[in-house]
Structure formats: structure tokens, C-alpha cells
Image (spheres, grey):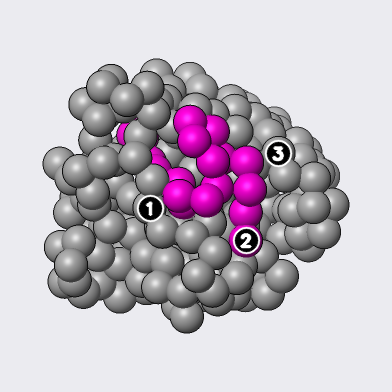
Amino acid sequence: MTYKILTVITFLTFSFAFTTTNNLESANIVGESVALLETTKVNLTVEEEIKEVYTDFVENNTSVPDLESFKNGMMGYYKLSDQKLLDKNILTIIDFTLSSTKKRMWVLDMINNKVLFNTVVAHGKNTGGEFATKFSNTVNSLQSSLGFYITGETYFGKNGYSMFIDGMEKQFNSKARERYVVVHGAAYANPSFAKKLGRLGRSYGCPALPTALTNDIIDVIKDKSVIYIHSADKDYIKNSAMIKA
């Protein structure tokens, strides 16, 4: 009887030692893998990290901004986030290199890498016809302004539910409040208008939205999220500090 008990104890001790050793080895392997992954991620450049995020957006959504406008938008988004100026992880990109008949505005959820809205958006009367080509930060220019904005508070005005935006780039859009450049809805920003005229109607410089989407979009992006208005404008690309790494 004593012999059998000793045999069982010996077997259990051996099994425990064997299992413990294997678990330790497995834990070491897992630990090394995690450490390697963390090191790899830390060593990514900003551009490489942005490309990874962009790839995820492409895989998860049917329509996304092109890589150039996305990269620029992310550069500014990171900087404004680092400055603790944002309350929402939302980035809106408006790509004025595209025709006003195209869906050139994307509202991006940066936590889940999802496109929340993709729609047409109007540009300023003196910025161009079908395409936006001229930009200004001057009062009464009736032109759109490029660059980064932080969304502000909402109000009800002559265009209904609207939202203030604050320009973050002194040279390019700092007079947005003074110019009353706001986000609002407009009948001339509806796709049906573009079908009749071959382009959207134009604002006094505001990024005007289709009336059916205005309330929903404003409610998502209001109160300190980022809007980036993109263009191939050489002056902006050369002189904007926000889009540089």
C-alpha cells in the first residue's frame, strides 16, 4: 500500500515538473513575440504608421480618400491631438482636387477605422466652377480656405442647423469665424442639383452639405473634431507646417 502511494506521488511530481517547464517555455516564447511586436511598432515612422492605418481603412470600407489627402489629414490630426485640442476621434477630409459632382467628403472614425459618411460638398463661389482652384483667407473673397479646422458649436441660422469651425492655420484659414465660414446645408449642394447643372452650386466660402445629411453629419463632427480641406494648391503644400512630418 505504501509503495503504491509513493509511486503515485512520484508520477504526479514528475508530471507537474514537466508541465511547469513547458508552460514557462511557452510563456517565454509568447513574451519574446509580444516584445518583438512592440519593438517593431515603436520603430515605425509616422508615414509607415499612417500607411498601416490607411490599409485598414481600405480593407474595411468601400470608399476612402486617396492616400495623399489621407496622409496630410493624418499629419494634422496627430498634431492637434498631441496638443490636446480635440474631444473627438473624428477626422473629416474634403478633397478639393475632385469635381464637385463627386463624393469628395469623408467623415472618418479614427477609433474603428470606419467611414461614417461619404458625400458631395460645395465650395466657394469664387473658388471655381466644377472644380475648386482658387483659395483665400480674405474677408468677402467668397472663396474657400484650405487646411485644418477644429469644429465648434452649433446654431440655427438662415441655412438652418449649422456649425462654426475655427481655422488652425494663420496663413490659410484663420479668419473663418470673421468670414462666417461655417458648415451648413443647402439645396444647391444636393446631388440632384449637380445632375441638372453639371456641377454643384456654390457657397460664399462655406463647405455646404446636402440637406438630407446636414443634421446627422454636424451632430457627429461638432464640438472639437478635425476637418481638413485638401487641394493640390502649391502655396499650401509648400508652406503649411501642419502637413509636414
Question: Is the magenta region chiefly helix, strand or loop?
Answer: loop
At a point 52% along the width and 51% down the height, the residue shown is 126
Q: Residues within 10 Å of mark 1 (few under 14, many from 20)?
A: many
Residue type (three-letter) at the residue carrying disc 1? Ser
At a point 49% along the width and 43% down the height, the residue shown is 94
At which x and y percent is residue 228?
Answer: 55, 52
Residue at label 2?
A: 136
Residue type (three-letter) at the residue carrying disc 3? Ala
Q: Residue 107: which quarter of the image?
A: top left
> How far, Cα to Cα, is label 3 from label 1?
21 Å
Residue type (three-letter) at the residue carrying disc 2? Ser
| Camera-nearest residue between 101 and 241 | 101
Instruction: Establish if 221 lies above or below 155.
Output: above
Instruction: Establish if 179 lies above or below 129.
Output: below
Q: Which mark is residue 132?
A: none
At a point 75% along the width and 36% down the height, the residue shown is 48
In the image, the segment drawn in magenta is 119-136
